[in-house]
Image (cartoon, rainbow, N blue to C red):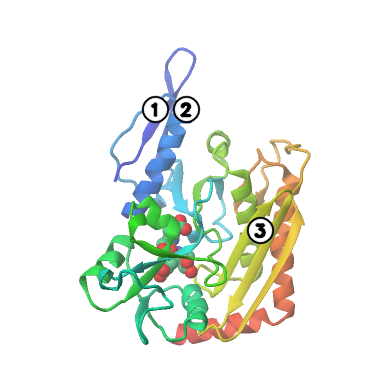
Amino acid sequence: CIAFMFSQQDGNGKVSRVIRIGTRKSQLACIQTDSVAEKLKGLYPDVHIEIGDNLFTALERNEVDMVVHSLKDLPTALPPGFTIGAVLKRENPHDAVVLHPKNTGKSLDTLPNKSVIGTSSLRRAAQLKKRFPHLEFKDIRGNLNTRLKKLDEKDDFSAIILAAAGLRRMGWESRVSQILGPEDCMYAVGQGAIAIEVRAKDKDILEMVSVLHDPNTVLRCIAERAFLRRLEGGCSVPVAVHTEVKGSQLYLTGAVYSLDGSDSLKETMQTSIASDNKVEEVDEWVQRVGVTANNMPGPAQDASEKLGLDLANLLLSKGAKEILTVARELNDAR
Ligand code: DPM
């Protein structure tokens, strides 16, 4: 795995600081980390690249200054002392179908009865069981490389479901046979966005990475994360979302499901994210659902957070808590 180390130079060309980026060891994590390093290199040209092998807990031990993650793997509340300093422009947030080579040309609709689909995501299984009752769903574990190997080299699965964004980053787009739209399968909170985690007190690092924030992605993901936090959902609950920015409006659709998808609640709300572009005073350093975005208008971020909260409250008033509690209990008992 390649980690990038680079230095900021002062006016005299002296090295004043080395910035270290940590990553997990999977190929996807390395690709994501490298893409962030490339972007930072473009923005801050005095860059040196080194081979490294940083553990992902290294941020806590001050061994690295930032860690690159898939946003959807980050909890809605980070441990004290850490914050998400950048949320990069989201790629296709939808899920994709990857077929066993023998099924080329088929789709979820046309796969034979009792075909086995691989996914360990309760969210995917719940939605797809309801929508495609002729299919069966089984857990498949491991990183993306392992999963693709299990699909291709064995006869256990007819197809697997993976995030389109991850497949694209791995260069496996040609394996995508079908992108699942919101009517088939809504995506996970934060899916498709890369996040940079930093120490909250490292103001210079925060400022450095904050230019990588993609405003629309930030607002969508704040709304989605606020929704999930209010539902007390972790990273593996049958909760799904869909967000869109149209003009000055942010739309959030959120849903909760029973494990087999037979029971569900789904609602949509919207809010205005119009702003006069007045950026908050830099000394406020507000965190919203773990995200620090001082270079973006505060009111729009507040409106997005409130949208997520309001939508979760609406679903809770209709019985979302009961659906999720049962789903959690049944899943724990599996
Ligand atoms: C989380 C889930 C999964 C990952 C649950 C979900 C999928 C697990 C599975 C929270 N994290 O989505 O409902 O399929 O068994 C993960 C992937 C990516 C980030 C891989 C994937 C890449 C895409 C991205 C695993 N985390 O979902 O196919 O950047 O969003």
Image coordinates of residue 155 in percent, x first then y, are 23, 77
Q: Residue furthest top?
A: 12
Q: Quadrant of residue 256?
A: bottom right
Residue under circle 3? 223
| Labelled pair 3, 2 in contact (Cβ < 8 Å) | no
Total marks drawn?
Answer: 3
**Could you tell whether 240 is left or right of 277 in the image?**
left
Mark 1 vs mark 3, CA separation in Å: 35 Å
Q: Quadrant of the C terminus?
A: bottom left
Residue under circle 1? 47
Q: Say which label, 1 or 3, has the lower sequence index.
A: 1
Residue under circle 2? 44
Mark 1 vs mark 2, CA separation in Å: 7 Å
| Labelled pair 1, 2 in contact (Cβ < 8 Å) | yes
Helix, strand or loop for disc 3: helix
Q: Residues within 10 Å of mark 1 (few under 14, many from 20)?
A: many
**Could you tell whether 86 is left or right of 25 in the image?**
right
Image coordinates of residue 181 in percent, x first then y, are 53, 66
Residue 36's place in the image compared with 315, above or below, is above
**Could you tell whether 4 is left or right of 91 in the image?**
left
